[in-house]
Amino acid sequence: MDRIEQALRLEKVDRLPIAPVITAKRDAFEKLVSENGDLIRSFDGFLLHPRVFDSGYLYIPSKPSLPEPVPVIGSLDGYDEVSDLGPADYAFKVHEEKELVTDLAERIRESSEAVKKFAERWDKEGVASYCGVLGVTPMGFLSYYRGLNEVLKDMGRESDRFLRVSMDIAERYPEFLAEIAKETTVQRACISFAYSSPSTVGKYYFERYVWPPAKAMIKGLIGRGITPILQFDDPIDDYKFLKELPPRTSMIHIGHETELLKAAEELKGFMCVVGNFQIPLGEEAAEESRKVLERIKAEDLVTGLVLSTEGNSPFILEAGNIEHLIRFLSLISGK
């Protein structure tokens, strides 16, 4: 845990921190942790994703409780209601009217309490909660409630209106997310750039209409004492825009090993990078992983970097794959 905290603060560490991200069911995870204490203590922690708590309610009301965007906002005039109510109250209203989750407030409260109890119980065992709450960018919020294609059209035909409502979301959304994070006692918030990456909306729209409100929202979380963990679904050509955020206040989770070094190089000394690192199966794969590790050390990228495991991306700890973690640990430690 100490190495992870040092990495978050961009302090020097004696070796790369290793913390697999876990998204398995909570009961199964707790059993495995209890039965494999020595292995757990070999790592610097396990980053526990809130999805382990059997629900996505800590991701709501960031998006409707449906797998894909739904056209709740039927026209541009619907944006006015989002601005009037604010993103949280608007989402609660939609869930009630559409009978998606009628007891949403209670579900969120129960999920927050579950995260809190887990964090309190397992913190001493080196199991770190990844974040306390999940959110999306203002662009992502609107896309979930209107549909991505329509939102893209809106940015082109009503750019000022779109930017205005996005900034309204950016101003009011952090308070809601921060309250949940503090209730869980895990004061980190995962912010997904789903439907909001430069490759999805195009560089022009991203720089003018997507990133400015996203940046304002992230700064709002930082100002409330929350550490944002940024996640992009797609590879990023250039991470330099992230340097517009206050330094040493955020993290970024890189889901693909091929992007890990690039992000670590561009954000060196500025932001902590948590990166998925594939468990090598076979000597050839292990050799490739060793080369990556050598480059990390040669280019002094150890500081501010936390390695996770790809496995089932992110890694799901099960009784049958514990030996893979042992192999991973041996590779990283060089033993």
Image (cartoon, grey):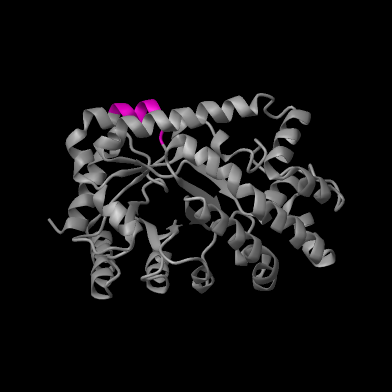
Task: Classify residue 151 as left or right of residue 282.
Answer: right
Q: Is residue 110 visible?
A: yes
Q: On the picture, is 303 further left or further right than 254? A: left
Q: Is residue 53 left or right of residue 174?
A: left
**Displayed quadrant of residue 62:** top right
Q: Nearer the viewer, residue 246 or 297?
A: 246
Eyeballing the image, is 80 above or below 251? above
Q: Is residue 11 magenta?
A: no
In the rendered view, does 137 fall on the left or right side of 11?
right
Picture layout, residue 309 above or below residue 316 = below
> Where residue 284 sits: x, y (%)?
25, 62
Q: Nearer the viewer, residue 120 or 76?
A: 120
- When the figure is inspected, residue 61 is found, relative to residue 169, above or below; the finding is above
Percent across and percent down for residue 142 are: 72, 51
User: Which residue appears at 59% of the width and 46% of the height?
Assistant: 175
Total marks in image: 0
Percent x, y for residue 249?
A: 44, 60
Q: Nearer the viewer, residue 104 or 263?
A: 104
Please indicate, yes or no, whether residue 153 appears anywhere in the rendered image.
no
Name which residue lies at 57% across and 31% down: 108
Residue 313 location in percent, x, y?
42, 48
Residue 160: quarter of image: bottom right
Q: Nearer the viewer, residue 307 or 96?
A: 96
Q: Quadrant of the C terminus?
A: bottom left
Question: Which secondary structure is most common in the magenta stretch?
Answer: helix
Q: Range of the magenta residues?
A: 24-31
Task: Name the residue: 76% across, 60% down.
Answer: 164
* Identity of the residue furthest to the left in this view: 335
